[in-house]
Amino acid sequence: MVNLKTAVGDLTLDKPGMVASGIMDETGASMVRMLECGAGAVVSKSVGLEPHEGHANPCFTEVRGGYVNAMGLPNPGIELFREEMAEAVPHGNIVGSIYGAGPDDFRSLAISMEEYGACAVELNLSCPHAKGYGMEVGTDPDMVKRIVMAVKSSVDIPVWAKLTPNTHILPTIGMAVQDAGGDAVVAINTLKAMVISPEFARPVLSNKFGGLSGPAVKPVGVRAVYDLSTVLDIPIIGVGGIMDWRDAVEYIMAGASAFQVGSGIGIDGPSIFEEINRDMECFMKEYGYKSIESMVGIAHE
Protein backbone atom coordinates (compact mmCIF):
# COMPACT_ATOMS: atom_id res chain seq x y z
CA MET A 1 0.00 0.00 0.00
CA VAL A 2 1.44 3.37 -1.06
CA ASN A 3 1.02 6.43 1.17
CA LEU A 4 1.28 9.88 -0.43
CA LYS A 5 1.04 11.69 2.91
CA THR A 6 4.10 13.67 3.89
CA ALA A 7 5.17 15.77 6.84
CA VAL A 8 6.86 19.15 6.63
CA GLY A 9 7.83 19.52 10.25
CA ASP A 10 4.62 19.69 12.28
CA LEU A 11 2.43 20.14 9.19
CA THR A 12 1.09 16.96 7.59
CA LEU A 13 -0.10 17.03 3.98
CA ASP A 14 -2.36 14.36 2.48
CA LYS A 15 -0.58 14.92 -0.84
CA PRO A 16 3.00 16.13 -1.33
CA GLY A 17 2.38 18.78 -4.01
CA MET A 18 1.56 22.41 -3.29
CA VAL A 19 0.72 25.42 -5.44
CA ALA A 20 3.74 27.73 -5.50
CA SER A 21 3.22 31.37 -4.63
CA GLY A 22 2.25 33.52 -7.58
CA ILE A 23 -0.13 31.44 -9.69
CA MET A 24 -3.81 30.57 -9.14
CA ASP A 25 -3.57 31.91 -5.58
CA GLU A 26 -4.65 35.54 -5.76
CA THR A 27 -8.28 34.93 -4.77
CA GLY A 28 -10.08 32.67 -2.36
CA ALA A 29 -11.96 31.00 -5.21
CA SER A 30 -8.79 30.17 -7.15
CA MET A 31 -7.14 28.71 -4.06
CA VAL A 32 -10.16 26.51 -3.37
CA ARG A 33 -10.11 25.31 -6.98
CA MET A 34 -6.48 24.22 -6.69
CA LEU A 35 -7.21 22.24 -3.52
CA GLU A 36 -10.05 20.53 -5.36
CA CYS A 37 -7.64 19.66 -8.18
CA GLY A 38 -5.36 17.59 -5.94
CA ALA A 39 -2.94 20.05 -4.34
CA GLY A 40 -1.99 19.21 -0.75
CA ALA A 41 -1.74 22.91 0.05
CA VAL A 42 -1.82 26.30 -1.66
CA VAL A 43 0.73 29.02 -1.02
CA SER A 44 -0.92 32.41 -1.43
CA LYS A 45 0.26 35.24 -3.60
CA SER A 46 2.93 37.19 -1.71
CA VAL A 47 1.19 39.92 0.27
CA GLY A 48 2.67 43.08 1.78
CA LEU A 49 1.55 45.66 4.30
CA GLU A 50 -0.06 47.98 1.73
CA PRO A 51 -1.68 47.54 -1.69
CA HIS A 52 0.89 47.46 -4.49
CA GLU A 53 0.30 47.65 -8.24
CA GLY A 54 3.52 45.97 -9.31
CA HIS A 55 5.42 46.71 -12.50
CA ALA A 56 3.81 48.11 -15.64
CA ASN A 57 3.15 45.91 -18.66
CA PRO A 58 4.78 44.13 -20.30
CA CYS A 59 5.69 42.17 -17.18
CA PHE A 60 5.52 38.59 -18.49
CA THR A 61 6.84 36.74 -21.53
CA GLU A 62 7.19 33.14 -22.64
CA VAL A 63 10.61 31.75 -23.55
CA ARG A 64 11.91 28.35 -24.59
CA GLY A 65 11.84 26.29 -21.43
CA GLY A 66 9.53 28.46 -19.39
CA TYR A 67 8.55 32.02 -18.56
CA VAL A 68 10.27 35.25 -17.58
CA ASN A 69 8.20 37.54 -15.39
CA ALA A 70 8.64 40.80 -13.54
CA MET A 71 5.28 41.20 -11.89
CA GLY A 72 6.72 43.36 -9.14
CA LEU A 73 4.72 41.79 -6.28
CA PRO A 74 1.25 43.16 -7.12
CA ASN A 75 -1.17 42.52 -4.26
CA PRO A 76 -4.14 44.08 -2.46
CA GLY A 77 -2.36 44.49 0.88
CA ILE A 78 -2.76 42.41 4.01
CA GLU A 79 -6.01 44.01 5.21
CA LEU A 80 -7.97 43.28 2.04
CA PHE A 81 -6.45 39.81 1.72
CA ARG A 82 -8.39 38.83 4.83
CA GLU A 83 -11.43 38.26 2.59
CA GLU A 84 -9.61 35.85 0.28
CA MET A 85 -8.25 33.84 3.20
CA ALA A 86 -11.68 33.64 4.80
CA GLU A 87 -13.02 32.02 1.63
CA ALA A 88 -10.12 29.58 1.14
CA VAL A 89 -9.05 28.45 4.63
CA PRO A 90 -12.14 26.31 5.41
CA HIS A 91 -11.34 24.12 2.38
CA GLY A 92 -7.79 23.03 3.20
CA ASN A 93 -4.19 24.00 3.89
CA ILE A 94 -3.43 27.61 2.94
CA VAL A 95 0.11 28.88 3.46
CA GLY A 96 0.36 32.66 3.69
CA SER A 97 3.20 34.12 1.61
CA ILE A 98 4.44 37.51 2.80
CA TYR A 99 7.11 40.00 1.82
CA GLY A 100 8.59 43.01 3.58
CA ALA A 101 11.62 45.25 3.91
CA GLY A 102 12.73 44.03 7.33
CA PRO A 103 11.87 42.14 10.53
CA ASP A 104 9.08 44.46 11.67
CA ASP A 105 7.22 44.18 8.34
CA PHE A 106 7.45 40.40 8.33
CA ARG A 107 6.40 40.15 11.98
CA SER A 108 3.26 42.22 11.45
CA LEU A 109 2.28 40.35 8.28
CA ALA A 110 2.84 36.94 9.84
CA ILE A 111 0.63 37.83 12.80
CA SER A 112 -2.15 38.77 10.40
CA MET A 113 -1.77 35.59 8.35
CA GLU A 114 -1.97 33.48 11.50
CA GLU A 115 -5.08 35.38 12.53
CA TYR A 116 -6.59 34.66 9.09
CA GLY A 117 -6.11 30.92 9.58
CA ALA A 118 -2.95 30.17 7.56
CA CYS A 119 -1.51 26.74 8.38
CA ALA A 120 2.01 28.16 7.91
CA VAL A 121 3.66 31.33 6.72
CA GLU A 122 6.17 31.48 3.85
CA LEU A 123 8.65 34.37 3.95
CA ASN A 124 9.42 35.65 0.46
CA LEU A 125 13.15 36.28 0.78
CA SER A 126 13.88 35.61 -2.86
CA CYS A 127 11.89 37.61 -5.43
CA PRO A 128 14.54 38.83 -7.95
CA HIS A 129 12.68 41.82 -9.42
CA ALA A 130 11.27 43.93 -6.54
CA LYS A 131 13.58 46.67 -5.31
CA GLY A 132 14.05 46.70 -1.54
CA TYR A 133 12.35 43.34 -1.03
CA GLY A 134 12.83 39.64 -1.72
CA MET A 135 16.30 38.77 -2.93
CA GLU A 136 17.72 42.10 -1.74
CA VAL A 137 17.05 41.16 1.89
CA GLY A 138 17.30 37.39 1.37
CA THR A 139 20.97 37.26 0.39
CA ASP A 140 22.20 38.72 3.70
CA PRO A 141 22.49 35.87 6.25
CA ASP A 142 22.29 38.27 9.20
CA MET A 143 19.14 39.94 7.89
CA VAL A 144 17.57 36.55 7.10
CA LYS A 145 18.29 35.40 10.65
CA ARG A 146 16.79 38.55 12.14
CA ILE A 147 13.64 38.26 10.02
CA VAL A 148 13.07 34.59 10.84
CA MET A 149 13.68 35.18 14.55
CA ALA A 150 11.24 38.10 14.58
CA VAL A 151 8.50 36.01 12.96
CA LYS A 152 9.15 32.90 15.04
CA SER A 153 8.83 34.93 18.24
CA SER A 154 5.47 36.32 17.12
CA VAL A 155 3.47 33.36 15.74
CA ASP A 156 2.77 29.75 16.63
CA ILE A 157 2.31 28.43 13.09
CA PRO A 158 5.28 27.00 11.14
CA VAL A 159 7.61 29.52 9.51
CA TRP A 160 9.08 28.69 6.09
CA ALA A 161 11.66 30.77 4.23
CA LYS A 162 11.73 30.80 0.43
CA LEU A 163 15.31 31.16 -0.79
CA THR A 164 16.86 32.54 -3.94
CA PRO A 165 19.24 30.63 -6.22
CA ASN A 166 20.85 33.95 -7.19
CA THR A 167 23.62 33.66 -4.60
CA HIS A 168 26.81 31.69 -4.10
CA ILE A 169 26.09 31.21 -0.38
CA LEU A 170 22.78 29.36 -0.52
CA PRO A 171 23.75 26.78 2.15
CA THR A 172 24.82 29.64 4.42
CA ILE A 173 21.44 31.31 3.95
CA GLY A 174 19.73 28.02 4.70
CA MET A 175 21.75 27.65 7.90
CA ALA A 176 20.73 31.18 8.92
CA VAL A 177 17.09 30.12 8.65
CA GLN A 178 17.72 26.98 10.69
CA ASP A 179 19.75 28.78 13.35
CA ALA A 180 16.95 31.31 13.76
CA GLY A 181 14.44 28.55 14.46
CA GLY A 182 12.82 28.38 11.02
CA ASP A 183 10.68 25.30 10.42
CA ALA A 184 11.53 24.72 6.73
CA VAL A 185 13.18 26.23 3.69
CA VAL A 186 11.63 26.45 0.23
CA ALA A 187 14.03 26.28 -2.73
CA ILE A 188 14.13 27.77 -5.26
CA ASN A 189 12.58 31.00 -6.47
CA THR A 190 13.17 32.22 -10.03
CA LEU A 191 16.53 32.85 -11.66
CA LYS A 192 17.33 36.45 -12.56
CA ALA A 193 16.89 36.74 -16.32
CA MET A 194 16.39 39.09 -19.28
CA VAL A 195 14.80 38.93 -22.73
CA ILE A 196 15.67 41.45 -25.48
CA SER A 197 13.61 42.16 -28.60
CA PRO A 198 15.97 42.29 -31.63
CA GLU A 199 13.34 44.22 -33.62
CA PHE A 200 13.06 47.00 -31.04
CA ALA A 201 16.61 46.65 -29.65
CA ARG A 202 15.18 46.94 -26.14
CA PRO A 203 14.45 44.64 -23.20
CA VAL A 204 10.98 43.11 -23.53
CA LEU A 205 9.94 43.64 -19.91
CA SER A 206 9.19 47.10 -18.58
CA ASN A 207 11.43 46.32 -15.60
CA LYS A 208 14.19 45.21 -18.01
CA PHE A 209 14.95 42.03 -16.06
CA GLY A 210 12.75 39.45 -14.36
CA GLY A 211 12.72 35.91 -13.06
CA LEU A 212 13.02 32.74 -15.15
CA SER A 213 10.71 29.88 -14.17
CA GLY A 214 9.63 26.63 -15.79
CA PRO A 215 11.37 23.42 -16.93
CA ALA A 216 14.65 25.20 -17.69
CA VAL A 217 15.32 25.88 -13.99
CA LYS A 218 14.63 22.37 -12.67
CA PRO A 219 18.24 21.11 -12.68
CA VAL A 220 19.26 24.24 -10.77
CA GLY A 221 16.49 23.67 -8.23
CA VAL A 222 17.35 20.01 -7.76
CA ARG A 223 21.00 20.88 -7.20
CA ALA A 224 20.03 23.58 -4.69
CA VAL A 225 17.86 21.16 -2.71
CA TYR A 226 20.65 18.56 -2.78
CA ASP A 227 23.17 21.09 -1.47
CA LEU A 228 20.83 22.36 1.26
CA SER A 229 20.04 18.80 2.31
CA THR A 230 23.69 18.17 3.09
CA VAL A 231 23.79 20.91 5.74
CA LEU A 232 20.23 21.29 7.08
CA ASP A 233 18.25 19.27 9.60
CA ILE A 234 14.98 21.12 8.97
CA PRO A 235 12.69 20.06 6.09
CA ILE A 236 13.14 21.33 2.54
CA ILE A 237 10.35 22.02 0.05
CA GLY A 238 11.49 21.78 -3.56
CA VAL A 239 10.19 24.06 -6.28
CA GLY A 240 11.24 25.02 -9.78
CA GLY A 241 10.29 23.53 -13.14
CA ILE A 242 8.22 20.58 -11.95
CA MET A 243 6.10 19.33 -14.86
CA ASP A 244 5.43 15.68 -13.98
CA TRP A 245 6.03 12.93 -11.44
CA ARG A 246 9.65 12.41 -12.51
CA ASP A 247 10.51 16.01 -11.76
CA ALA A 248 8.78 15.83 -8.37
CA VAL A 249 10.56 12.60 -7.45
CA GLU A 250 13.93 14.12 -8.40
CA TYR A 251 13.36 16.85 -5.85
CA ILE A 252 12.25 14.35 -3.20
CA MET A 253 15.23 12.10 -3.78
CA ALA A 254 17.52 15.15 -3.59
CA GLY A 255 16.17 15.83 -0.11
CA ALA A 256 12.78 17.56 -0.34
CA SER A 257 9.92 16.41 1.89
CA ALA A 258 7.33 18.08 -0.37
CA PHE A 259 7.26 20.13 -3.55
CA GLN A 260 5.55 23.09 -5.16
CA VAL A 261 4.34 23.61 -8.73
CA GLY A 262 4.04 27.03 -10.38
CA SER A 263 4.71 27.37 -14.10
CA GLY A 264 3.53 23.81 -14.67
CA ILE A 265 0.01 24.92 -13.78
CA GLY A 266 0.19 27.61 -16.45
CA ILE A 267 1.53 25.18 -19.04
CA ASP A 268 -0.58 22.08 -18.33
CA GLY A 269 -3.46 23.42 -16.24
CA PRO A 270 -4.73 22.56 -12.73
CA SER A 271 -5.03 18.86 -13.59
CA ILE A 272 -1.25 18.60 -13.21
CA PHE A 273 -1.63 17.72 -9.52
CA GLU A 274 -3.96 14.77 -10.13
CA GLU A 275 -1.62 13.52 -12.86
CA ILE A 276 1.48 13.81 -10.66
CA ASN A 277 -0.26 12.10 -7.73
CA ARG A 278 -1.48 9.21 -9.90
CA ASP A 279 1.78 8.66 -11.74
CA MET A 280 3.92 9.01 -8.61
CA GLU A 281 1.80 6.37 -6.91
CA CYS A 282 2.33 4.02 -9.85
CA PHE A 283 6.09 4.59 -9.73
CA MET A 284 6.21 3.99 -5.98
CA LYS A 285 4.27 0.72 -6.32
CA GLU A 286 6.55 -0.51 -9.11
CA TYR A 287 9.78 0.28 -7.27
CA GLY A 288 8.69 -0.70 -3.77
CA TYR A 289 8.48 2.68 -2.06
CA LYS A 290 5.79 2.62 0.64
CA SER A 291 5.85 6.32 1.50
CA ILE A 292 7.16 9.71 0.45
CA GLU A 293 9.43 9.63 3.49
CA SER A 294 11.14 6.49 2.20
CA MET A 295 12.28 8.43 -0.89
CA VAL A 296 13.40 11.67 0.80
CA GLY A 297 17.14 12.21 0.26
CA ILE A 298 17.75 8.70 -1.05
CA ALA A 299 20.04 10.06 -3.79
CA HIS A 300 22.56 10.92 -1.06
CA GLU A 301 23.03 7.26 -0.13
Image (cartoon, grey):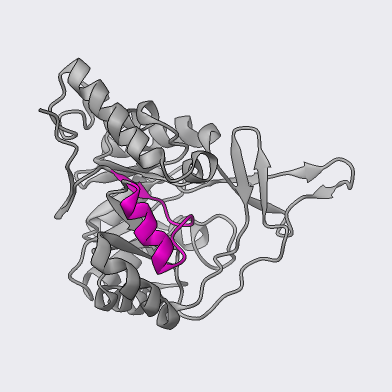
Q: Check the image and report above or below for 54 versus 239.
A: below
Determine whether 296 is above or below 157 in the image: above
- Most extreme residue toward the left is 1
Question: In x, y percent, where is residue 135?
Answer: 50, 57
Left or right: residue 156 versus residue 108 is left
46 and 103: which is toward the camera? 46
Which residue does the image show at 17% across and 42% down from the upper left? Answer: 5
Q: Residue furthest top?
A: 286
Question: Does the rendering let one see residue 137?
Answer: yes
| Quadrant that contains the C terminus | top left
Q: On the rendered structure, is 160 left or right of 192? A: left
Query: In x, y percent, where is residue 237?
Result: 31, 45
In the picture shown, does residue 64 fall above or below 86? above
Left or right side of 79 for 291:
left
Give the residues in magenta: 17-37
Q: Give residue 232's position: percent from left, percent from top.
A: 24, 43
Res. 43 in view: no
Q: Residue at x 46, y 55 (%)?
A: 139
As for residue 21 lying within the magenta part, the answer is yes
> Which part of the image, by quadrant, shows the N terminus?
top left
**Residue at x 39% of width, y 37% of height:** 224
Decide which of 227, 9 is in the foreground and name it.
Answer: 9
Q: Is residue 18 magenta?
A: yes
Is residue 167 positioned above or below 97 on the image?
above
In the image, 182 versus 157, the foreground residue is 157
Report whether 179 appears left or right of 101: left
Residue 136 is situated, as x and y percent measured from the top left of the image, at 52, 61
